[in-house]
Image (cartoon, helix red, strand yellow):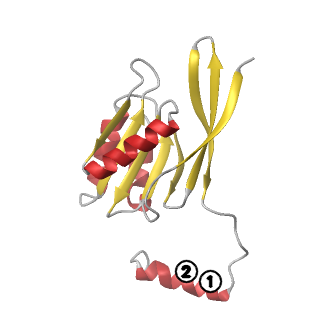
Amino acid sequence: MEDIEIKTVRIEKPDDMNFIFGQTHFIKSVEDLYESMANSVPSAKFAVAFCEASGACKVRVEGNDEVLKKLAEKNALAIGTGHSFIVFMKNCFPLNVLNAIKNNPQVCNIYCATANPTIVVIAESKNADGKGRGVLGVIDGFIPKGVENKEDFVWRKKFLRDIGYKL
């Protein structure tokens, strides 16, 4: 039986920064995810960090913004789960790039795409072969405070139009 420890890692980022966290399976993912971001929203600033799960087991980082690259690197190292990736972005939203990212042949799973405070729940194994980590899930944001009422409905409709996502 494996000796497994449950850990949590809080995503460190500015409050309003969006990110996508997922799992992929191949070292070329970091370059392919870079291309997906650049091709989806050419004016976006972003960084991708990928945790290699075999061989050299390095965190691979690409991006077009040095500050975001450091942020992605820091979070990827803290999470440290095999074949996971994290993308931080400015001047775009996950809505603009999520399908392009999901359509990468290497992408296996998207755990979250959010600007909310997020905690990654991790299982870490300790066995004769060494340590390994896997994602059990994420805690994205907060507990619901009730059901949308008429005022909330009006606010939602207005908000989507104010930010240009509805006519």
Considering the numbered disc 2 on the image, is that residue within a helix, a strand or a loop? Answer: helix
- The residue drawn where x is 39% and y is 27% is 58
Q: Is residue 105 visible?
A: no
Q: Amino acid at mark 1?
A: Asp
For label 2, the residue is 156
Percent coordinates x, y for residue 95 in the rendering? 43, 61
For label 1, the residue is 152
Percent coordinates x, y for residue 39 in the rendering? 27, 52
Q: Is residue 142 visible?
A: yes
> In the image, is 118 to the left or to the right of 56?
right
9 or 37: which is nearer to us?
9
> Dots 1 and 2: beta carbons under 8 Å?
yes
Q: Residues within 10 Å of mark 1 (few under 14, many from 20)?
A: few
Percent coordinates x, y for residue 114 in the rendering? 50, 58
Eyeballing the image, is 95 above or below 164?
above
- The residue drawn where x is 47% and y is 25% is 53
Q: Amino acid at mark 2?
A: Arg
> On residue 14, which mark appears?
none
Eyeballing the image, is 78 above or below 150?
above
Eyeballing the image, is 162 above or below 111?
below
